[in-house]
Image: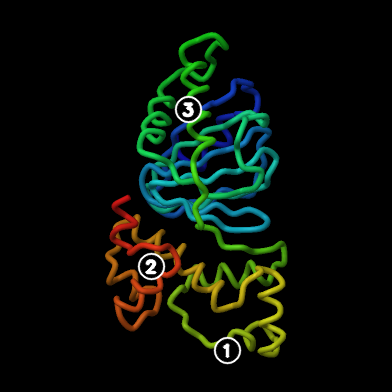
Amino acid sequence: MSLSKSLKNFNIDDNTNPVVAMKVQSAKSDEELPFHVHRKGQLILTLHGGVTCLAPTAYWMVPAHCAAWIPAGQPHSNRVTPNAQVLFLYLEPDATGMPQECCTLQISPLLREMMKHFEEFAQDYAPDSHTARFAHVMLHELSQMPVERLSLPVSDNMRIRQLADSLMENPGDRSSLDVWASRMAMSKRTFERFVLKETGMTFGRWRQQLQVLVAIRLLVTGVSVQNTAYELGYDSVTAFITMFKKMLGTTPGRYLDN
């Protein structure tokens, strides 16, 4: 099932089982779903490619060994890379141990295989069935997964979202604070205060966080470390690796091997 058709053909909120799964395949080009809301909580596991989730307060990158968690009733949108494969798990709102806020969760190899196996089961399983017992064990494992630092804070201010979208579309733009302030029709000091107020970060720190998300998106789709560094506007691969390790505690190569 394609990503764009999934919402039209799959009314998940009618199913009251604790967990329901659905696997989708994106088109040959980037796809984006509009903002929408589920009665259930939604877990988005990337099987191939990359997914970026958008919510009112942040953007989240979802590389292949992680999953995005969207609590029940939270407006969100999804952007996927070409030919991505994504597994959606929908959890009832009372699922125990799940975070109350949107986040990216690290997914263990065991849990990843459990989720892929669960997707093969029928969605209308009985409460006393093997599928229901399997779901219970899987939910317990899921509640133990650690949160990853793969989000970019934003707000509902359209200007900060425009700034984020601009940098995501052209992550190699290394323009100075003065230039960005001018583009936003602000003084340098006003621009600095604006970004800090809307994101909780300085512009420099916020831009680095965004670049990490873009870097992961490129790397998981097969772009080399060297070309990723070039796309992000770095003069050398070493400088890019240093920034990546500072932000995530590991090199790009080791990150992809996890």
On the picture, is 136 further left or further right than 219? Answer: right
- Name which residue lies at 49% across and 72% down: 208
Tell me residue 97's x, y (percent): 60, 35
| Position of the N terminus by quadrant | top left
Q: Amino acid at mark 1?
A: Val
Residue at mark 1 to residue at mark 2: CA–CA distance = 28 Å
Q: Looking at the rendered structure, which numbered label has been put on residue 179? A: 1
What is the x, y in percent for residue 164? Answer: 58, 69
What's the residue at 40%, 23% (across, down)?
120
Q: CA distance from mark 1 to mark 3?
A: 50 Å
Say which label, 1 or 3, has the lower sequence index. Answer: 3
Query: Where residue 232 appears, x then y in whole percent?
Result: 40, 74
Residue at image position (57%, 62%) is 152
Q: Is residue 77 above or below residue 132?
A: below
**129 and 6: which is toward the camera:** 129
Q: Amino acid at mark 2?
A: Lys
> Mark 3: which secondary structure?
helix
First in sequence, mark 3 or 2: give its number.
3
Q: For this view, does 164 lie left or right of residue 106?
A: right
Whole-percent x, y for residue 138 in the image: 48, 27
In the structure shown, which secondary structural element does the residue marked by tag 1 occupy? helix
Label 2 SS? helix
> Which residue does the numbered mark 3 point to in the structure image?
138
